[in-house]
């Protein structure tokens, strides 16, 4: 996603409410490193792409009920 001169990479985590874990539980340091590596690969694969002035990594957590209906959606800007 691009927001002005900032290129934003967004990690989305979804969980069902019957599970004990929250969407953020799996956004550990290993996953954050993986997202950063993917962002680096994305930027290096298309050198003709305009270079953004800033990069940002957001996270979106989605919590669904047992029927798949949205219970909660959280968006954290600059999450990591």
Image (cartoon, rainbow, N blue to C red):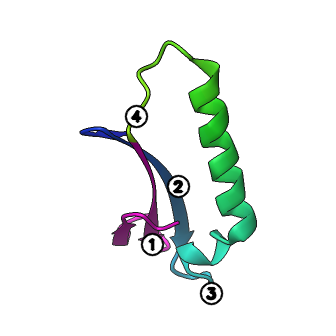
Mark 4 element type: loop
Residue assigned mark 4: 52
Question: Which image quarter: residue 25?
Answer: bottom right
Q: Earlier in the sequence, mark 4 or mark 3?
A: 3
Say which mark, if any, is on residue 63.
Answer: 1
Element marked by disc 3: loop
* Mark nearer the viewer, 2 or 3: 2
Separation (CA) of disc 4 from disc 2: 19 Å
Eye-nearest disc, 1 or 4? 4
Residue behind mark 3: 20
Question: Which of the pair 38/64 is nearer the observer?
Answer: 38
Answer with mark 1 or mark 2, whichever residue precedes in sequence.
2
Q: Residue at x 50, y 12 (%)?
A: 48
N-terminal of the pair, mark 1 or mark 3, is 3
Expressed as whole percent of the image width and height from the top left, the position of residue 32 reads 65, 61
Q: Are marks 4 and 3 in contact (CB under 8 Å)?
A: no
**Image side of residue 21 versus residue 49, left or right:** right
Q: Residues within 10 Å of mark 4 (few under 14, many from 20)?
A: some
Magenta segment: 54-80
What's the residue at 38%, 39% (across, down)?
53
Q: Secondary structure at mark 2?
A: strand
């Amino acid at each position: 996603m691009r927001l002005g001169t900032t290129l934003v990479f967004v990690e989305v985590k979804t969980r069902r409410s019957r599970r004990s874990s929250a969407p953020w539980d799996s956004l550990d340091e290993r996953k954050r490193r993986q997202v950063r590596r993917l962002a680096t690969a994305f930027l290096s694969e298309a050198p003709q792409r305009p270079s953004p002035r800033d990069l940002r990594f957001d996270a979106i957590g989605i919590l669904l009920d047992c029927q798949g209906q949205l219970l909660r959606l959280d968006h954290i800007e600059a999450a990591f």
